[in-house]
């Protein structure tokens, strides 16, 4: 059974940095894209970033472009989200997700598996 486990969330000050990790356990037997989403209280879950299997193609939401960077290490079955220049509006629960396709999906319905989420809080 494939499971995703996020880590690395916490409290940061505005302008600071955090790095999230998402470890994929279990055998998938397939290649997959990995994405990050976030959900703030009272809001819908929104796309943040996605990376393809080989790691040579990425796509970001406009709100994080230039500040966040997604990467992956397939040898460790892990995807990362480096978050720099954090803003209070980045505060949310961050989720990683897997899509067993060759696309770079940006909507929640396109993903097949989800992690449980990790809280990121950015203070003024």
Image (tube, grey):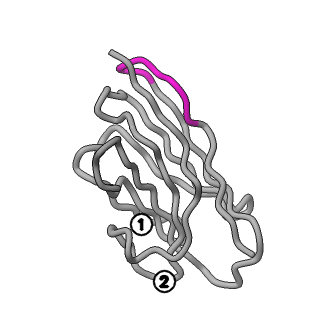
Q: Residues within 10 Å of mark 2 (few under 14, many from 20)?
A: some
- The image position of residue 71, as x and y in percent, is 52, 53
Vertical relation: 37 (above or below) 106: above
Vertical relation: 103 (above or below) 37: below
**Pick the front one: 36 or 82:** 36
Q: Is residue 62 left or right of residue 46?
A: left
Residue beneath label 2, please? 101
Residue range corresponding to the magenta coloring: 9-16
The residue shown at (35%, 27%) is 85
Q: Residues within 10 Å of mark 1 (few under 14, many from 20)?
A: some
Task: Look at the image and tell me in which quarter the N terminus lies.
Answer: bottom right
Outermost residue to the left: 62
Q: Is residue 78 left or right of residue 87?
A: right
Vertical relation: 68 (above or below) 34: above
Residue beneath label 1, please? 57
* 3D distance between C-alphas at marks 1 and 2: 14 Å
Vertical relation: 12 (above or below) 36: above
The residue shown at (38%, 75%) is 109
**Pick the front one: 73 or 50:** 50
Task: Look at the image and tell me in which quarter the C terminus lies.
Answer: top left
The residue shown at (60%, 80%) is 31
- The image position of residue 78, as x and y in percent, is 65, 57
SS for dot 2: loop
**Pick the front one: 93 or 57:** 93
Residue 51 is covered by the magenta coloring? no
Label located before the other in sequence (1 or 2): 1
The residue shown at (70%, 72%) is 2
SS for dot 1: loop
- The image position of residue 97, as x and y in percent, is 52, 64
Q: Is residue 49 left or right of residue 24?
A: left
- The image position of residue 73, as x and y in percent, is 65, 58
């Amino acid at each position: 059974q494939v499971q995703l486990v996020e880590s690395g969330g916490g409290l940061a000050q505005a302008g600071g940095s955090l790095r999230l990790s998402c470890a994929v356990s279990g055998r998938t037997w397939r290649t997959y894209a990995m994405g990050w989403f976030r959900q703030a209280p009272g809001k819908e879950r929104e796309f943040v970033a996605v990376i393809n299997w080989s790691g040579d193609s990425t796509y970001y939401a406009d709100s994080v472009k230039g500040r966040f960077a997604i990467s992956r290490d397939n040898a460790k079955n892990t995807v990362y989200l480096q978050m720099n220049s954090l803003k209070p509006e980045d505060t949310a629960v961050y989720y990683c997700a897997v899509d067993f396709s060759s696309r770079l999906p940006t909507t929640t319905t396109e993903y097949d598996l989800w992690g449980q989420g990790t809280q990121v809080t950015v203070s003024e």
